[in-house]
Image (spheres, helix red, strand yellow):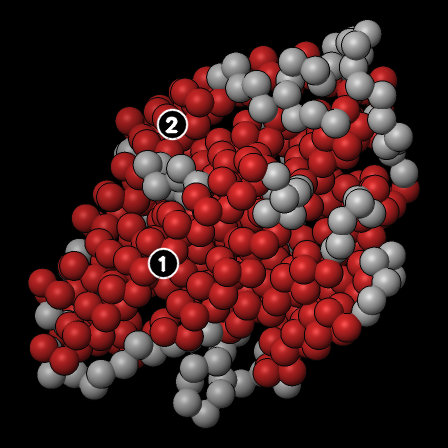
Amino acid sequence: MMWLFVTLPLLGALIAWLIPDNRLRPLVLPVFALPHLAMTIRMVADTPPASPDGWILLDPLGKLVLISVSSLFAVCAVYAVGYLRFRRERSNRILCVALLVCLSAMTLETVAQNLGLLWVALETTSVAMAPLVYFNRNARSIEATWKYLLICSVGIAIALFGLFFLAYSTIVAKQDVTLLLSSLIEDAPRLHAGWRHTAFIFLLVGFGSKMGLAPLHTWKPDAYGEAPGLVGALLAGGLVNCAFLALLRVYQIAMATSEAASFQGVLLAMGLISMAFAAVFMARQSDLKRMLAYSSVEHMGILALALGIGKGALFGALLHMINNGLTKGVLFLSSGNIHRAYASKSTEFIRGVLRRTPWSGALFLAAFLAITGSPPFGPFISEFTIVSNAFVQGDNWAGGLFLLFLLVIFIGMASTVLPVVLGTVPADAEATDYRDTSATVLPLLVLMGAVLMLGVWLPLPLQTLLHDAAALLGGNR
């Protein structure tokens, strides 16, 4: 059953490759994405047992990431049908195939309990995303693609060395050689300290670069800026969540060792550095999508910061992972609509969005308020949970800097977003055929509704799952 779950999107990718019609091919995306979401819900509610070798198991952490990824992908798949009607100037075969391959790889990662298998799945997502970044096929997109491939490939290679060192630490300690997560957690205190410490450094750098933590974030502005909004949504709400899951697996092992405090200290520092970078570069940003890329750096920093704080903040981190993914979906999909309406990403030419594309403009404004931590949206609840736990646990300086960076980022982002949304359409603005349609707006409304719901009501099953997942990270300690 689990292997059918993982391979279903691959069947969709094969069918998408064989369909010759550029207009019919995008329909394959929702045809396979929606059953995948239905299977996800069933798997979460009625979890199958682990595979005999223990390599495959859907635990609470995997369930959270799987729910986040599958939900976002299903909405993006429905949106893609309407979006690609406006992109008939080029073939969408590679895009449809690569999207479904990426879904399969992300699914595999969520159920992988062997760190080697997890690494293979994460690397597959990197390779599958590359042609998606290059979809526009211009000089800037090819530059962004190479930068994305180079930095992420180096990062994932560093993570591979980290796995080698972790495995070697079991040999030196005369333990059973394994990369199985449960065994590594159990044997962690007995592993060779020097090789274990080296492994943690390499894994943190490797998976941190894939998440886009500063100063390892340099691929994000170009990749997010040049990729279509559809791809940007999956990068910011899907791919980075998978990288975060990989980091969580390392965190589980580190918390079972004497290096737990130092590992958390490094995460705390990287989180604050990422927020600081975002605060600096988001101010007066002239490219709408690059601004969202720096927002992603900020929120990866928030996740790292929460891991560094630990205990009650872990619940907030996992909730924020979901909130950030959904909100980024609204921001990138609506920015894609705005890009089509103005044939530009530059804030110099984009003004009066509420007049030209009122639905996309209103959703972009609402998502901006949500992502900057404004009530009553979901990110406010998760960010409040994190910062309140920082003060409760005595990390006053971390909590203070967290609030300061949030304020600076809100001001910087507002200085870009508000003129774009509320201004007047320039007289020399390029006329385009794009206008909001139900196919390109309804999926955004679904996502925005979920972001609002998580700010006013957290379903009991989700609460329970969040608590169970936080417990795996030591959230009850």
Residue at image point 49% right, 78% down: 57
Q: In which quarter of the image is residue 165?
A: bottom left
Say how many tags the image has.
Answer: 2
Residue 69's x, y, as percent? Answer: 61, 58
Residue 208's x, y, as percent? Answer: 36, 49
For discs 1 and 2, the disc positioned in front in the rendered view? 1
The amino acid sitting under disc 2 is: Phe
Q: Nearer the viewer, residue 472 or 116?
A: 116
Q: Which of 16 and 377 is in front in this view?
A: 16
Residue 222's x, y, as percent? Answer: 50, 36
Can residue 243 be seen at all in this image of the molecule?
Answer: yes
Residue at image point 59% right, 47% down: 134
| 247 versus 222 height, above or below | below
Q: Which mark is residue 220?
A: none
Q: Nearer the viewer, residue 302 or 128?
A: 128
Q: In which quarter of the image is the C terminus?
A: bottom left
Task: From the image, tell me which residue sits under label 1.
Answer: 156
**Horizontal relation, residue 422 to residue 52: left or right:** right
Q: Which residue extends farthest front?
A: 139
